[in-house]
Amino acid sequence: MDAMEAILTRRSIRKYKTTPIPESMILELLDAAMNAPSSGNAQPWHFVIVTERKILDEIPAFHPYSDPIREAPLAIVVCANLHLEKNKGAWVQDCSAAIENLLIAANAKGLGAVWLGVYPYEERVTGVRKLLCLPDHVITLGIILVGYPAEKKPPANRFKMERVHRDKW
């Protein structure tokens, strides 16, 4: 699958087969994520790989939109180490770029994925911090559920020419 196809056919997948994701494929997804651009090349991201069913099943207790996690064989928790940040606040963009790379790579590999937002919701940030024993200087932007898709969605055509402006508004 070429890059444009991977981007244009990527959809949020919330139903998964229980088949585990091979370690080599997880590492490829992380490689894609870590090759995202970052402000000042700070690369503040850290990733927590969660496959332990007991841990996955605790997330809905503090994240109201995480029910699909009950089927997902893998969650990749995307965090930022604030000590690595070069430009204050840029960690959000840095980790967002890493997540988008990860989502596109998952689609290109035939996997389904969905981004569960954590930051800026304090109860979710605190819930992840406690559950995964994160240090105080590490904050979670999102949880990415990954699995072999048990649903198929057609590409969404989201291009809107009326939102394109040239030279001025």
Image (cartoon, helix red, strand yellow):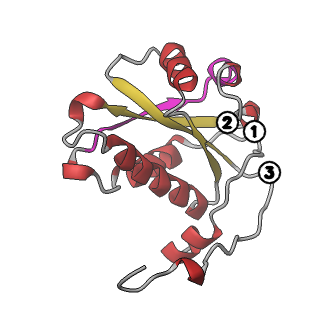
User: Left of 62 or right of it: where is 104?
Assistant: left
Query: Was residue 127 drawn as part of the magenta stretch in this picture?
Result: no
Q: Are marks 1 and 2 in contact (CB under 8 Å)?
A: yes
Residue span colored magenta = 43-59
Q: Are marks 3 and 1 in contact (CB under 8 Å)?
A: no
> What quarter of the picture does the N terminus occupy?
bottom right
Q: Tell me the kind of residue under disc 2.
A: Pro
Residue 109 is drawn in which quadrant?
bottom right
Give the residue at mark 2: 73
Kindly report the distance in space between the C-alpha atoms of the residues bearing marks 1 and 2: 6 Å
Kindly report the distance in space between the C-alpha atoms of the residues bearing marks 3 and 1: 9 Å
Give the residue at mark 1: 18
The residue shown at (31%, 40%) is: 89
> What quarter of the picture does the C terminus occupy?
bottom left
For label 2, the SS is loop
Residue 116 screen position, x and y as percent: 61, 40
Residue 86 screen position, x and y as percent: 19, 41
Give the residue at mark 3: 150
For marks 3 and 1 on the same chain, the one whose residue lies earlier in the sequence:
1
Q: Is residue 101 above or below residue 146?
A: below
